[in-house]
Image: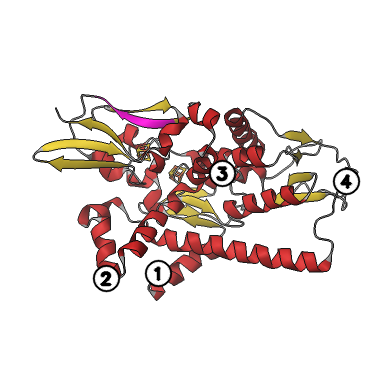
């Protein structure tokens, strides 16, 4: 990675929200109907120029835009979702009872184990799903007055909606309480100094690993104009020069990760869970026979989930299910209304690829 790229990425890491305009459907096409971030931002701090997403100084750093954005064009960094999730799961493994709360609604009882986030609205349904599957001893602490007096006006609407969606997927629920109760076997987290220090350094190591993974991946996001000029694979091969195929494969695979912050959590929950695989919680595009193979969807798709292949004047469009983030851009931009997102079994996400349509 060259120094300028590294500086750019580290600069993005220093801000609370990483902005990647090449992933924003609204900037890719004026036909995009997505304005989720603007709709849910509590301070209306998000606006668009021709090429950039601007966040003004009124931003409360709640992370709601990151939950709302289907493509992770806005990615909350403070703290990153993966770090939040791993810390909550770790706490739940170590303790009998853990209370999750937002920083604006602190738990005053120091004898219980807690995990906090800037706003519960920063947790998308996929992360709730992970917690529902891994943390049976987690309870949400929500004081009687609730979120009504909070400056993050859209917070409660977002977290309840995302929690409910996660609960529907999991078929179970997380308890919400306004009263803290003590468990007889409550084990205070890391009171012993040695245990505290070792857990502290382990968390730093884990956080660095996550940050590095995100950092390496986040350099590969190219605009659709660039994609048209130079095939991404050819460009990477040229840049990497003599580097072995093995490393090259690893990098290209990991480059998909920042697009798929939420999908990664969903894919992890799908592994080995037959009941969840049979449910129809996801949508994927389906192409109708009236498609004229103009290729617009394959060029504009922000995550490269659609690919057009042409062989001996025969066209075909292939979907890479795991990369599709249900952003609706393909549906919004298709001039012949030939593409439609449809509910399919969750297990479809695990397929390597799926031929959508071939020219007859
Ligand atoms: S794609 Fe993300 S950043 Fe762009 S308008 Fe939609 S929610 Fe906002
Ligand atoms: S295939 Fe369509 S819905 Fe899926 S990520 Fe691409 S543009 Fe969005």
In the image, is 242 to the left or to the right of 174?
A: left
The residue wearing badge 3 is 41
Q: Is residue 154 visible?
A: no
| Of the two numbered discs 4 and 2 in the rendering, the one whose residue sits closer to the viewer | 4
Query: Ligand 1 is located in which of the four quadrants?
Result: top left
Q: CA distance from mark 1 to mark 2?
A: 18 Å
Q: Which residues are magenta?
A: 283-288
Give how far across and how far down residue 74 sits, in percent.
Answer: 49, 50
Give how far across and how far down residue 44 sits, in percent.
Answer: 55, 45
Q: CA distance from mark 1 to mark 4?
A: 50 Å
Q: Which mark is residue 241?
A: 2
The residue wearing badge 4 is 185
Give how far across and how far down residue 97 sits, in percent.
Answer: 80, 44
Nearer-N-terminus badge (4/2): 4
Residue toward you, 113 or 334: 113
**For residue 10: magenta?**
no
| Of the two numbered discs 1 and 4 in the rendering, the one whose residue sits closer to the viewer | 4
Q: Residues within 10 Å of mark 1 (few under 14, many from 20)?
A: few
Nearer-N-terminus badge (1/2): 1
Q: CA distance from mark 3 to mark 2?
A: 43 Å
């Amino acid at each position: 990675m060259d120094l300028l790229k590294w500086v750019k990425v580290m600069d993005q890491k220093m801000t609370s929200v990483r902005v990647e305009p090449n992933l924003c459907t609204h900037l890719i096409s004026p036909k995009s109907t997505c304005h989720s971030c603007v709709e849910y931002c509590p301070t209306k701090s998000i606006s668009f120029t021709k090429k950039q997403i601007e966040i003004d100084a009124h931003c409360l750093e709640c992370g709601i835009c990151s939950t709302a954005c289907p493509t992770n064009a806005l990615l909350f960094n403070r703290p990153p979702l993966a770090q939040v999730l791993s810390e909550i799961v770790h706490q739940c493994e170590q303790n009998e009872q853990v209370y999750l709360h937002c920083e604006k609604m602190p738990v005053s009882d120091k004898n219980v184990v807690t995990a906090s986030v800037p706003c519960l609205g920063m947790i998308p349904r996929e992360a709730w799903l992970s917690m529902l599957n891994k943390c049976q001893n987690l309870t949400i602490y929500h004081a009687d007055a609730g979120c009504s007096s909070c400056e993050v006006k859209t917070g409660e609407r977002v977290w309840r909606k995302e929690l409910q969606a996660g609960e529907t997927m999991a078929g179970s629920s997380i308890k919400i309480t306004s009263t803290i109760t003590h468990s007889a076997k409550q084990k205070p987290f890391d009171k012993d100094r040695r245990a505290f220090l070792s857990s502290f350094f382990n968390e730093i190591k884990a956080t660095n690993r996550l940050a590095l993974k995100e950092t390496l991946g986040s350099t590969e996001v190219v605009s659709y104009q660039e994609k048209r000029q130079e095939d991404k694979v050819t460009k990477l091969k040229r840049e990497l020069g003599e580097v072995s195929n093995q490393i090259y494969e690893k990098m290209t695979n990991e480059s998909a990760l920042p697009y798929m912050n939420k999908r990664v959590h969903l894919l992890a929950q799908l592994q080995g869970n037959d009941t969840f695989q049979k449910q129809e919680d996801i949508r994927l595009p389906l192409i109708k026979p009236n498609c004229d193979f103009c290729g617009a969807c394959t060029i504009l798709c922000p995550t490269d989930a659609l690919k057009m292949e042409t062989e001996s004047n025969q066209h075909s469009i292939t979907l890479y299910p795991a990369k599709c983030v249900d952003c609706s851009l393909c549906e919004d931009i298709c001039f012949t209304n030939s593409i439609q997102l449809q509910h399919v079994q969750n297990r479809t996400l695990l397929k390597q690829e799926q031929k959508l349509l071939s020219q007859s």
